[in-house]
Image (cartoon, grey):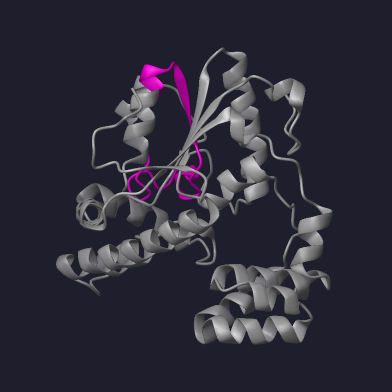
Amino acid sequence: MDGSLEGNSTQTAGKRAILIAGPTASGKSALALELAKQRNGVIVNADSMQLYEDLRLVSARPSIEEEQQVPHRLYGILPASTAFSTGAWLRLAIEEIQSVWEDGRLPILVGGTGLYFKGLTEGFAEMPDIPSEIREEARRLADEGGVATLKSALADAGDREAAEALADPQRLARALEVILATGKPLGFWQKEQQSDPFLRPGQCESIVLAPPRPWLHERIERRARLMVSEEGCEEIRALLAKGLPEKLPAMRAIGVAEIGAFLAGESDFENTVNRLTVATRQYAKRQETWFRNQMAGWQRFDPSAETPFH
């Protein structure tokens, strides 16, 4: 099966898909499950942390019981020792979508990783590999100096366009990584390597969950308490026992450091719940900002109300 990133009109013409994005703890998986039952759907994961087999509870992957109700694809497929790129996910996702269509079913992509959806629907620029020492230096600048330091470093390195246009520290750090590693600015790679969209707007029912903040915050706190349950602690204990480098994506997931400190006796239960709640709220806010800015044309849906998608 073709795993390229190029859209093919003969492969996708007349084919439909549902895309469900939203902040963490907003009920994406529940909505996807309901729609999959109604519409002969197959759920395809579009969340970077739910790819990891080691993080079922901490990443809020669908339960085994939920996965048995309808087919779920690309969940728990990677060991925590793997670093996975957006381009790698796109290749797997395209294969899965094509497979679902071939079976006469409806692909329902669900997750909180906005770049995955953006790559599917707008095309994706395949970036060069970045040496680990350069990536670590960019992250250090982001952590210690923030936006102003990153903008200055980026301009000094020769990418004034990105320094002036970008304001998000993660995107600034990424632009800095690229020019330091390749000598060419981010805009060069975005123009030279851009693939065609695989899914076109007319093919997709594109939904962003936009819950009321008090409703979302209550769910986030409930999830935090579940993460510090016996099952959640055992999951993190098993992950930490592998002795993996802290720079790996799975090791940077919300919950790993916080529950690790709890297991080491450095934090009590309520303090750990509070730390998890604050970190998750901050992450959800960043997601909401990204979806609002990058997915302005998507249908907004309040998951605290009755679903209108029957």
Q: Nearer the viewer, residue 164 or 130?
A: 164
Q: Nearer the viewer, residue 261 or 125?
A: 125
Residue in the image at 52% along x and 16% along y: 105
Residue 266 lies in the magenta-colored region:
no
Residue in the image at 84% along x and 55% along y: 192
Determine whether, in the image, residue 206 is placed left or right of residue 270. Answer: right
Eyeballing the image, is 95 above or below 185? above
**Does residue 23 appear in this view?**
yes
Residue 62 lies in the magenta-colored region:
yes
Count the labels in the image: 0
Q: Find residue 82 and report its horizontal and vertical position in percent.
A: 58, 51
Question: What secondary structure characterizes most of the magenta part?
Answer: loop
Quarter containing the N terminus: top right
Q: Find residue 197 and report its horizontal and vertical position in percent.
A: 70, 39
Per the rendered image, the range of residues in magenta is 36-63
Residue in the image at 34% along x and 21% along y: 69
Q: Find residue 43 and report its horizontal and vertical position in percent.
A: 46, 29
Eyeballing the image, is 230 above or below 270? above
Determine whether, in the image, residue 166 is placed left or right of residue 297. Answer: right
Q: Quarter of the image holding residue 160?
A: bottom right
Q: Nearer the viewer, residue 17 or 134?
A: 17
Q: Nearer the viewer, residue 208 or 281?
A: 208
Quarter containing the C terminus: top left
Residue in the image at 50% along x and 61% along y: 244
Q: Find residue 277 and report its horizontal and vertical position in percent.
A: 26, 63
Please identify the residue farthest to the front as the structure is shown: 297
**Does residue 134 appear in this view?**
no
Q: Quarter of the image holding residue 204?
A: top right
Please identify the residue farthest to the top as the structure is shown: 104
